[in-house]
Image: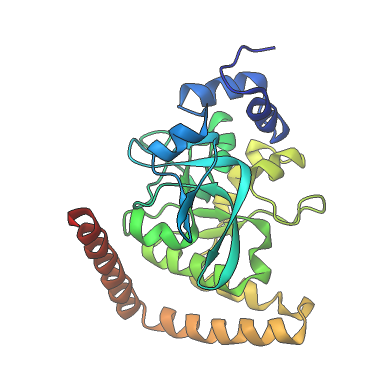
Amino acid sequence: MTKTKLEQVHYQHLIEEGFTHEEVSELEGWGVRSIDLSESLRMGIKKWDGFKHVSDGGLFFPFSPEYGQVRLNTPITVEEKGKLKTFRYLGPSKPTKVWYPSTEVYALTEGWKDAAIPTVRGVPTGAIAGIWNVIHCVPQGCEIPIIFDSDVWAKPHLVHGLIQAGVWTQGRINLFPEMPDYPKGGACEFFNSGGTIADYQELIDNAMTPAEFLGQWVCRWERFDQGLRSECAYVAERLSLYLEMESTYIKGLESQVQDKLAEWLGKTKG
C-alpha cells in the first residue's frame, strides 16, 4: 500500500471515492491533509450556533492559500434563520476561491474531490465551492464550461444558479448523466459508475449555452409532479427574461459582485 500521512479513515474515504493509491499520493502533494479540531478552529473553519462556535476536524482540501474546506469527521447541525441546517463540508467565513490545478483548466465543477479526479486522469478541472459563488470568484467572460451534478434537472434553484454562472462566464453548461446507484452523482460517482476520462471530455465538448440548457430543462418537466412543474415554470419564465436582456442582467450581476466586495471590505476593516 502507498504510504500516506492521512488518518486511515480519511485515506479510506478517498479510496472509496474512486481514487487509486497513487492518486491519493498526488492529492497529498497538492495539500490534502488530515486536520484536528484545534487546527480547524485556528483556520476559522467554524459555525456560530447561539452562544458558541461549533466545528470539527476532518479532511482538508486547499482551494487556494487563503481558502480551503474541511470534510468534517462528524457533520454539524446549527440553527440558521430559525431552521436547522446540517453541514458536512465547511470553510472559513471569508470569500471563497476557485481551485485551479494548473494554469489552464478545461472545465469547472463543484467540490474539490470532483475536480481532482478528472484532473489526475488528464483533464485539468477547477473546483468551485458552490454554484452561487461563481460570479464572486470566477473571472467574468472566461468561457470555461461548467459540468455539474446529475440531479440538477429537478432543482429549479440550481438551474437558475447554473444559467446565471453560464451568463457570467459566457461559457457552456452540462450535467453528469443520471446514475442509478448515485441519485446525486458528480464526477467521483461518474467514474465509479464506469465513466472514462474520454466520456468526461465528451461532456465538456457537448456542453450547452445557457439558452440551450434552458431548452433542455423544459423538455424534462413531464416527469415531474404538478407542484414541481409549476415551480420550474416560474423560474424558467424569469430566466427567459434574463436571457432576452442579457446585457442588463450582466450589469445586475456586476452590481451584486461590487456590493459583496464592499461588504467583505467593511468586515475586514471592522
Give the camera-side residue of 15 and 154.
15
Q: Is residue 219 above or below residue 64?
A: below
Looking at the image, how many numbered discs can be counted on the residues? Answer: 0
Q: How is the image coloured?
A: rainbow
Q: Is residue 144 above or below residue 195?
A: below
Q: Is residue 69 above or below residue 178?
A: above
Q: Position of residue 167 (x, y in %)?
A: 41, 67
Q: Residue at x 49, y 60 (%)?
A: 131
The N terminus sits in image quarter: top right
In the rendered image, the residue lying farthest to the right is 180
Q: Position of residue 143 (x, y in %)?
A: 39, 55
Give the camera-side residue of 253 and 107.
253
Q: In the shown orientation, is residue 255 left or right of residue 84? A: left
The C terminus sits in image quarter: bottom left
In the rendered image, the residue lying farthest to the left is 269
Q: In the shown orientation, is residue 183 left or right of residue 142? A: right
Q: Position of residue 264 (x, y in %)?
A: 26, 59
Give the camera-side residue of 245 and 74.
74
Q: Is residue 131 above or below residue 211?
A: above
Q: Residue at x 38, y 52 (%)?
A: 93
